[in-house]
Structure formats: structure tokens, C-alpha cells
Image: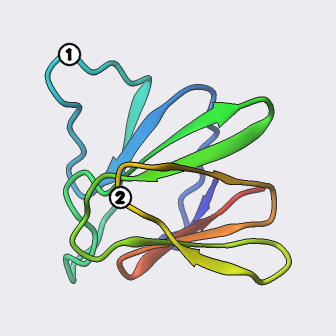
Amino acid sequence: LRFSTGDESTLTGTALIGRRPLAQRGEIVDRVITIVDPARTVSKTHLEVGRHEGDLWVCDRFSVNGTVITDAEGITRSLEPGRRYLARRGATVVFGEQSFTID
């Protein structure tokens, strides 16, 4: 994952992404990825990502500003909170004023 902040991260399991991501009681995640967002457009725990058969799935965690995926072909869709969406290589995921691209 290549973030708009300039950070990069390799995902091997599940991760929570946000300003101060925190797993819910009883929830197990492999890592948390903290995003610096001075404008506070990113929720504390904005989204969850994970691997599925070589692809990445993304799930909006009922964030205030939502999450949008634009695939490599330029098709954009807004994510329904709580539902997992596949995001393949070349897609860009926008959350608040931040984003990451899947390499």
C-alpha cells in the first residue's frame, strides 16, 4: 500500500487504518496503521483491510467521511459501511482527504 502521506506498508493479514485505530473488544487484527491527518477528515478507526486470494478487501468502519474505491479502469464506487469490497492492484482507496494505492 502506498499512502498519500508518503508512507508505504506491506499487508500480510488484516489491518485497521485511521487517526488512532483501535480494535473492538474481542476483535483480532494483525496490525494498526496510523494516518497523520491534521484536518481530521480521517476517522479514528476509518477502515479495515485484509487479504483474500491474492487480492485486497476494504471495509469502511462506519466512518464520518466515508470511503471510495477507484479501480484501475477508473470506475469509482462508494463503500457501504460494514461491507467488504475487493480492491485489486492499481486501485486507489480514498478515505477522508487521504488515500492509498494498491501496488
Q: Secondary structure at mark 2?
A: loop
Q: What residue sits 30% from the left and 52% below the top?
A: 61
Above or below: residue 102 compared with residue 97: above
Is tag 1's residue or tag 2's residue first in the polypeptide sequence? 1
Q: Which mark is residue 58?
A: none
Above or below: residue 26 compared with residue 48: above
**Amino acid at pointer 1:** Gly
Q: CA distance from mark 1 to mark 2?
A: 20 Å
Q: Label 2 neighbourhood size at 10 Å, few (<14), some (14-19), many (20+)?
A: some
Q: What residue sits 78% from the left and 84% below the top?
A: 74
Judged left or right of residue 26, residue 78 is: right
- Residue wearing tag 2: 81
Relative image position of residue 33 (x, y in whole percent) = 39, 45
Above or below: residue 44 compared with residue 93: above
Q: What residue sits 25% from the left and 45% below the top?
A: 21
Quadrant in which the C terminus is drawn? bottom right
- Residue wearing tag 1: 26
Q: What residue sits 20% from the left and 15% below the top?
A: 26
Relative image position of residue 64 (x, y in whole percent) = 21, 72
The one nearer the camera, 37 or 45, is 45
Above or below: residue 82 compared with residue 78: above
**Amino acid at pointer 2:** Pro
Judged left or right of residue 25, residue 88 is: right
Relative image position of residue 1 (x, y in whole percent) = 64, 53
Judged left or right of residue 94, residue 16 is: left
Relative image position of residue 47 (x, y in whole percent) = 38, 53
Q: Secondary structure at mark 1?
A: loop
Q: Label 1 neighbourhood size at 10 Å, few (<14), some (14-19), many (20+)?
A: few
